[in-house]
C-alpha cells in the first residue's frame, strides 16, 4: 500500500475559503476514487494557522495513478483552489505492514 501525504500552506486570510473547498469539494472527490483505502484530513491549529494536510492510503501505485495520472509524485491541484495556495508538498511512502 502507498501512503500519500499532502500538505498545503494557504495564503493568510484564505483559511476559511480553503477549508470549505478542502472539505466540501476535494475530500468528496478523493473519497470517490477507486483504490483508496483511507483518507484523513488535518485542519490548522494555533501553531500553524495556514497549514492543512490530507493523508491518504492507496491500495497500490496503479490505484494512486488512477487519481493523479502519470505525474503521481506531484500535487493534484483543482483550478478553483490555485489562488488560495501559497505552497504545497507531497510525500509518498510504502506503508509498513506491522
Image (tube, rainbow, N blue to C red):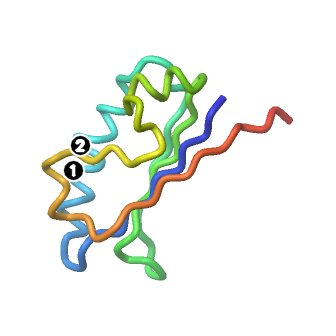
Q: Quadrant of the C terminus?
A: top right
For residue 21, the mark is 1
Q: Most extreme residue toward the right, as rendered?
A: 98
Q: Is residue 23 above or below residue 58?
A: below
Real-space Cα distance between discs 2 and 1?
5 Å
Seen in the image, is 5 located left or right of residue 72?
A: right
Q: Name the residue located 19 percent from the left edge and 57 percent from the top edge.
A: 82
**Quarter of image, res 52:** bottom left
**Residue 30: % across, % down:** 37, 33
Q: Is residue 48 above or below residue 65?
A: below
Q: Nearer the viewer, residue 23 or 86?
A: 86
Residue 42 seen anywhere in this rendered image of the structure: no
For residue 24, the mark is 2
Q: Most extreme residue toward the top, as rendered?
A: 34
Secondary element type, mark 2: helix
**Quarter of image, res 25:** top left
Q: Name the residue located 62 percent from the left edge and 34 percent from the top edge.
A: 2
Q: Are marks 2 and 1 in contact (CB under 8 Å)?
A: yes
**Residue 28: % across, % down:** 30, 33
Q: Most extreme residue toward the front, as rendered?
A: 70
Amino acid at each position: 500500500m502507498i501512503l500519500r501525504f499532502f500538505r498545503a500552506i494557504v495564503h493568510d486570510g484564505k483559511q476559511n475559503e480553503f477549508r470549505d473547498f478542502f472539505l466540501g469539494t476535494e475530500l468528496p472527490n478523493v473519497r470517490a476514487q477507486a483504490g483508496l483505502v483511507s483518507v484523513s484530513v488535518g485542519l490548522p491549529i494555533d501553531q500553524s494557522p495556514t497549514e492543512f494536510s490530507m493523508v491518504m492510503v492507496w491500495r497500490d501505485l496503479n490505484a494512486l495513478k488512477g487519481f493523479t495520472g502519470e505525474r503521481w509524485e506531484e500535487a493534484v491541484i483543482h483550478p478553483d483552489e490555485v489562488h488560495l495556495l501559497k505552497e504545497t508538498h507531497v510525500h509518498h511512502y510504502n506503508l509498513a505492514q506491522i
